[in-house]
Image (cartoon, coloured by chain):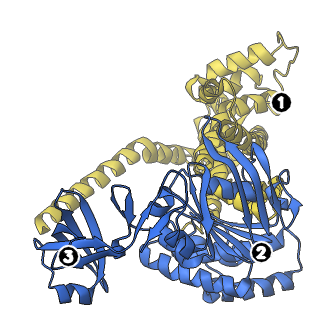
Chain colours: A blue, B yellow
Amino acid sequence: MSIAVRQVTKRFANGFVAVDNVSLAIASGSLTALLGPSGSGKSTLLRVIAGLETPDEGDVSILGEDVTGVPPQKRGVGFVFQHYAAFKHLTVRDNIAFGLVIRKRPKAEVRARVDELLGLVQLDGFADRYPAQLSGGQRQRMALARALAVEPKVLLLDEPFGALDARVRKELRAWLRRLHDQVHVTTVLVTHDQEEAMDVADRVTVMNDGRIEQSGKPRDLYEHPANEFVMSFVGPVNRLGEAWIRPHDLELRLEPNGTTSEAMVERIVHLGFEVRVELVLDDGRLVSAQVTRSEVEELELLEGQILYVRPSRTTVFSGTAMPQGRP
Amino acid sequence: MPARAGRSRRAGGLVLGLSTAYLTLIVLIPIAAVVASSFEGGLSAFWDEVTSPSAVAALELTFVASLLVVLVNAVTGTLIAWVLVRDDFRGKSVVNAIIDLPFALPTVVAGLTLLAVYGPKSPLGVDVAYSRAAIVVALLFVTLPFVVRAVQPVLLELDREMEEAAASLGSRPVTTFRRIILPNLLPAILSGAALSFGKAVGEFGSVVLISGNIPFDTEVASVHIFKSIEGDNPAGAAAVSVVLLVLSFAVLAVADVLERRSRRHDA
């Protein structure tokens, strides 16, 4: 295990328990996402791992070494912040070189290493610019190169794409994934965006109210959520009584067949290849179905039309027990 | 649209005209008058006044004392601002309010107070009255707020994550202060220092009581000017005034250049 967190609790001065008795193990070379809503404790947990926060209870070890009492500058972690934390009085080159310069590495070595990193983060022509002259995405890539320069044992990313617009986010996400496959440094990424977590991470840990709800591969979380929170957080979901139904597990038919319920098409939202059909059931409840464009054309769907729907797969949670999938 | 643009341009012109007229009346004309009267007797008379031994001594004392005060202020002012922004302690808001006291207090009252505390009847047993040290103490008192008030807002706005990033990169707190925090505070320190220099060079009220005004020893330039007027030598007073004026202006200009250079990265 590259990072081991054991029974960590962090309370803030106002009494708020940000992290509540959390244990977590992160495998070497993996890219793990800590996913959760704001206030779920995911950023605090990351800062505890980095040494930027001191836990009230529990301990943290990195590569088998207990670092609970070790200050951040001696932990060998690379940390990337949501708002870049660029050294704004230094050029891109000097930002990236910072960790090497304070270690008094030879000038030629620093220069070569920075050049290599500039290439890695695709900022070759930008060495002499100041952070204020870069776009958000470029600044974040600079921050990543700065963190990688000192060859950290683990790389911690705190909502790294949170301040960027949607298109740049997606690009950087794909780029980060490729970078991780190249560099192989154990990486923990904090995000509130389930799509981002599912997209880049090998493993996802879902947090809520300072606790871990579930850890697993993205697909496992989606298909076998441990509880209602995970079910609703990792993707859109309809709830009908005790049953939880993903929008793509709702079948639309023109004729009733005994197991279907009547519904009226309220709105048809075209999202490219996918189409979201918002429906009102005969008892007034709202559900949404996810279908493909060709299905919409086949059914000749129109707003205001009466349809018959049937869930093809439902999930029912009984207390805290494992979910039961019904085909 | 063109009509509105025209009107706003006319309004802008009016504001610019009014400000220029005001500045001319309040600042430029008096300065021009001083410069003119200093040259009434011609260039050589001006030179004679400025290079008279007592004038040189007064100017030298003023310049050296002000420089010393500025250096002390740059350090202590930054320190006080740091404590006020980064530390939490009881009575912080009181301390914060006290910083402005030297601005609010009439300077002659400040002089009187300093004389009572650091004079011959000092309750602390510290008597620096009528010495050069007294001048420095008085100038430190009246210039205290400049650097503090210049640095404080910049420090408040400083991105704390820069320090955390530096720490995670292996930087010890001292290194972080020297390499990350200080360069970001430098423009503010410089502008506060320049303003306190300007104030120190021309200070009269707080110095006149405690310095003793001994020619060639503790007589500062402003007191020298005052004495020249009293001794019916307005040309001499004006000449020394012009030197002070040039000195202050030069310091402001240099500080401005330095400040711009250290700000060049804030595109």
Q: CA distance from mark 2 to mark 1?
A: 65 Å
- How many marks are shown on the rendered structure? 3
Q: Secondary structure at mark 2?
A: loop
Numbered label attached to residue A28? 2
Chain assignment, label 2: A
Q: Does any portion of residue A238 appear in the rendered image?
A: yes
Placement of A16 over or under A128, stated as above or below: above
Residue at 51 percent across and 54 percent down: it is A38
> For this rendering, which residue is in front, A100 or B192?
A100
Question: Could you say where residue B267 lies in the image, as x and y percent from the top left?
Answer: 53, 69
Tell me, yes or no, whether dots 2 and 3 are on the same chain.
yes
Chain assignment, label 1: B
Amino acid type of the residue that numbered disc 1 sits on in the rendered structure: Ala
Q: Secondary structure at mark 1?
A: helix
Q: CA distance from mark 2 to mark 3?
A: 52 Å
Numbered label attached to residue A257? 3
Question: Could you say where residue A327 lies in the image, as x and y percent from the top left?
Answer: 41, 75
Placement of A269 over or under A229, stated as above or below: below
Amino acid type of the residue that numbered disc 2 sits on in the rendered structure: Ser
Numbered label attached to residue B133? 1
> For this rendering, which residue is in front, B266 or A40?
A40
Question: Could you say where residue B28 lies in the image, as x and y percent from the top left?
Answer: 45, 48
Amino acid type of the residue that numbered disc 3 sits on in the rendered structure: Asn
